[in-house]
Amino acid sequence: MPETVTPTSNLAAASSTVSAARRLDAIAQIVAASRDMPGALLPILHELQDVHGYVPAESVPVIAQALNLSRAEVHGVITFYHHFREHPAGRHVVQVCRAEACQSVGADALVKHAERTLGCSMHDTTADGAFTLEPVFCLGQCAIGPAVMIDDRLHGRVDAARFTRLIEGLRDAMRAEQNNKNAVEASV
Ligand code: FES
């Protein structure tokens, strides 16, 4: 029996095709802008992640072709560096330093606390998409470890209590934002 396609689903499919095409164009532009520089692969991956928040899977064949590499080689570099994400990040990115100086002052315990507080493991995103938890290896704050970066903001001497306060502050802000949004929608 033929599948029934409603006009709404046709529109949705068309719009997602357009946005996929736009994204592919944006990827191609980033690759073209850097492909001729020496060691182009890493700058391209950084730029893709800066623009998209992660390295989209569809960029791998584009990069491979432009740099004359195999897809496996490109994918190998993406997975080798912890910095690169293969999936979109959550609303807030929480990075806990796992390098030596921070480890010596309690980073391991802080990681466990972070996983419990957020309800997700390292490299994962919370079910509500609010937080992504990632390890990082030195934030340049070795004298004031354990160090944490949340989005673009550095925090030193972060113990469990301070970590909880930082996360609760962000949760409160997100709740307030959602309440405002609901109030505006209700008033229209
Ligand atoms: S070791 Fe953690 S900031 Fe340098």
Image (spheres, rainbow, N blue to C red):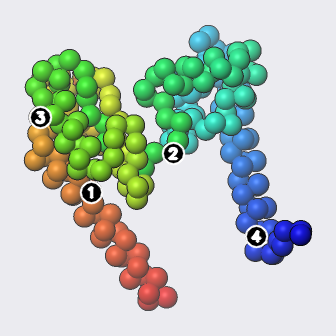
Q: Callout 4: helix, strand or loop? A: helix
- The residue that mark 2 highlights is 88
* Above-or-below relation of 33 to 186: above
In percent of width and height, residue 112 lies at 21, 38
Q: Amino acid at mark 2?
A: Pro
Q: Neighbour class for label 2 at 10 Å: few (<14), some, many (≥20)? A: some
Camera-near label (4 vs 3) is: 4
Mark pair 4, 2: CA separation: 25 Å
Residue sitting at x 40%, y 47%: 125
Camera-near label (4 vs 1) is: 4
Looking at the rendered image, the quarter that the N terminus falls into is: bottom right
Q: Image check: 92 left or right of 167?
A: right
Mark pair 4, 1: CA separation: 36 Å
Point out the tag, 4 or 1, that comes first from the N-terminus: 4
- The residue that mark 4 highlights is 9
- The residue that mark 1 highlights is 170
**Ligand 1 is within 8 Å of the C-beta of the residue at disc 4:** no
Q: Callout 1: helix, strand or loop? A: helix
Residue occupying the far front of the picture? 1
Determine which of the numbered discs, if any, sits on residue 157 in the image: 3
Q: Amino acid at mark 4?
A: Ser
Point out the tag, 1 or 3, that comes first from the N-terminus: 3
In percent of width and height, residue 101 lies at 17, 19
Camera-near label (1 vs 2) is: 2
Camera-near label (3 vs 2) is: 2
Q: Amino acid at mark 3?
A: Arg
Mark pair 3, 2: CA separation: 29 Å
The answer to whether the residue labelled 3 contacts the one labelled 2, judged by CB atoms less than 8 Å apart, is no
